[in-house]
């Protein structure tokens, strides 16, 4: 049976983005990506491979949120 | 990658790098100041994440000091690699945030709270917010997924799927448990996701949707 009830979390989990740059690149460039976010630039346009990764990888996304909180000087 | 021109001109960044490259009291003062900042960031980050990790009090403070100390060593050791692509503090705080992740992963891997090997499929609907009232719609897909996990994944991929997806073990805890690194674990899980999706589409459990 096909699941036709919308885009579920499970389907999202199973989908992979070929642009996904992986954790190693994300950890190396975490500060660059965070700086783009803080300065109001568009990181998805500048760094699409990293944007795809942060959208898919929970631990790297958590690191990004943590770094943004640290840079902004407060808790999110 | 290019950093912003503003970041490269940032006077505070220039001062940090100059002081940390200096000798004697100027460098010692800068190292002390940086260490204090890193401890503060580590404490806040641990508090932010400890809601899930349930770490508090002296244990949290101890982890914060460990993360800050390890980050300080990494920062001073890699100062020559700082290319001004961000402000210095953004670069430096990145190290302590990553250290916090590493410490929490190790902490979780030592905790008996979650098994990385027991296969409990009853957790799957909750993990993916599948509506129990619409079970008729997703039941076949979940059964198909279960078959796919058994039939198309390698032993290593299956182990990661069971631990991380079914049992909710943090990816960083699996990194510590397997003495691996985040990139390798993520890549194995990425390949497993792709294989499972293709397997499910080939057997009619999923629509093909956009090519991925």
Image: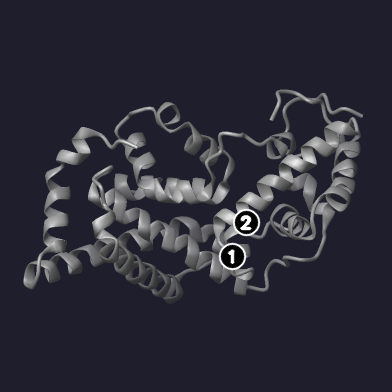
Which quadrant would residue B200 be assigned to in this image? top right
Is any atom of residue B5 visible in this view?
A: yes
Secondary structure of the residue carrying tag 1 is: loop
The quadrant of the picture occupied by the C terminus of chain B is top right
Cβ atoms at labels 2 and 1 below 8 Å apart: yes
| Distance in Å between CA atoms under marks 2 and 1 | 7 Å
Residue shown at 30%/51% (left/top)?
B91
10 Å crowding of disc 2: few (<14), some (14-19), many (20+): some
Spot occupied by residue B198 in the image (x, y as percentages of width and height):
80, 36
Disc 2 with disc 1 on a shared chain: yes
Chain of the residue displaying label 1: B
The residue positioned farthest toward the left in the image shown: B25
Task: Name the residue beneath numbered marker 2.
Answer: B185
The residue closer to the viewer here, B33 or B28, is B28
* Residue B133 visible in rendering: no
Q: Residue at x 33, y 58 (%)?
A: B41
Q: Which residue corresponds to the image point at 16% horizontal and 62% vertical from the top-left?
A: B20
Left or right of A38, for residue B192: right
Residue tagged by mark 1? Answer: B180
Residue B63, horizontal then vertical, whole percent? 42, 71
Can you say whether A16 is above or below A73 in the image? above
The image position of residue B7, as x and y in percent, is 21, 39
């Amino acid at each position: 049976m096909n699941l036709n009830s919308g885009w579920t979390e499970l389907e999202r989990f199973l989908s992979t983005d070929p642009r996904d740059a992986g954790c190693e690149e994300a950890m190396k460039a975490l500060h660059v990506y965070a700086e783009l976010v803080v300065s109001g630039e568009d990181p998805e346009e500048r760094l699409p491979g990293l944007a795809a990764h942060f959208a898919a990888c929970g631990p790297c996304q958590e690191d990004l949120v943590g770094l943004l909180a640290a840079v902004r000087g407060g808790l999110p | 990658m290019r950093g912003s021109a503003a970041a490269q001109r940032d006077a505070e960044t220039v001062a940090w790098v100059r002081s940390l490259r200096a000798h004697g009291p100027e460098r010692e003062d800068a190292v002390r100041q940086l260490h204090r900042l890193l401890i503060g960031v580590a404490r806040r980050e641990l508090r932010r994440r400890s809601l899930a990790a349930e770490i508090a009090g002296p244990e949290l403070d101890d982890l914060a000091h460990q993360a800050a100390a390890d980050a300080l060593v990494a920062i001073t050791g890699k100062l020559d690699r700082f290319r001004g692509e961000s402000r210095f503090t953004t670069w430096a705080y990145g190290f302590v945030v990553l250290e916090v992740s590493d410490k929490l992963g190790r902490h979780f891997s030592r905790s008996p709270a979650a098994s990385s090997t027991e296969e409990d499929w009853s957790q799957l609907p909750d993990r993916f917010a599948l509506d129990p009232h619409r079970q008729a719609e997703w039941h076949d897909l979940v059964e198909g997924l279960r078959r796919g996990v058994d039939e198309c994944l390698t032993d290593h991929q299956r182990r990661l799927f069971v631990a991380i997806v079914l049992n909710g073990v943090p990816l960083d805890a699996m990194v510590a448990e397997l003495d691996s690194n985040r990139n390798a674990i993520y890549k194995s899980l990425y390949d497993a996701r792709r294989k499972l999706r293709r397997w499910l589409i080939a057997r009619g459990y999923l629509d093909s949707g956009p090519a991925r």
